Amino acid sequence: MGGTDPDRRDDAAADAEPKGETLGGARPDPSTTASKDPSDWVTGDEPITGPQKSYLDTLAREAGEELPADMTKAEASENIDRLQQETGRGA
C-alpha cells in the first residue's frame, strides 16, 4: 500500500526558514518581551506559575537545593536560569 508517512517531514519544509516569531534558537531577539530581564517584567511580581513551580521543583531536586515556594515569577525565572546551568539542563 503506497502513500506518505504523516510523521515524515518534507525535505523542502525541513530546509525552509521559519516564518514569523519563533521560540528557541541561538539567541532571542532583544526587542521581544521574551528577552527582557525578569526584574523588568510587568508581571514579574506576580506569584510563581504552576509550570514554573513544577520545573523548579525538578531542577532544585537535581541540584540538591531547597527553594521557597512563595517566590515571584521573576524570582522563579532567575532561579530556573541558574539551576539549568548548575544541572546541565541549560542551553
Image: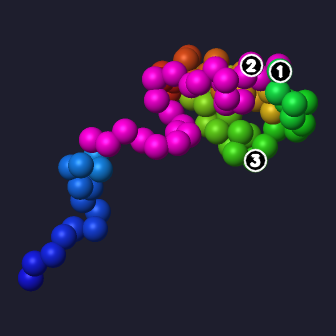
Q: Secondary structure at mark 2?
A: loop
Q: Mark 3 belongs to which amino acid?
A: Gly
Foreground tag (3 vs 1) = 1
Give, as a three-letter code, the residue at label 2.
Asp
Q: In this rendering, is residue 52 above or below 87?
A: below
Q: Which kind of residue does numbered mark 1 sit on?
A: Asp
SS under mark 3: helix
Point out which mark residue 50 bears: 3
Q: Which residue is mark 1?
A: 40
Residue at 51% across, 33% down: 24
Count how many numbered circles sit on residues in the image: 3
**Visible in this render: residue 72?**
no
Q: Earlier in the sequence, mark 3 or mark 1?
A: 1
Q: Which of pointers 2 and 3 indicates the residue nearer the eye?
A: 2
Is the residue under label 3 in contact with that under label 2 (CB below 8 Å)?
A: no
Disc with the residue nearer the chain's start (2 vs 3)? 2
Residue at (77, 23) in percent of width and height: 38
Q: CA distance from mark 1 to mark 2?
A: 5 Å
Depth check, front residue: 5 or 81: 5
Instruction: Identify which residue is drawn at 21% across, 68% down.
Output: 5
Q: Looking at the rendering, which quadrant does residue 56 occupy?
A: top right
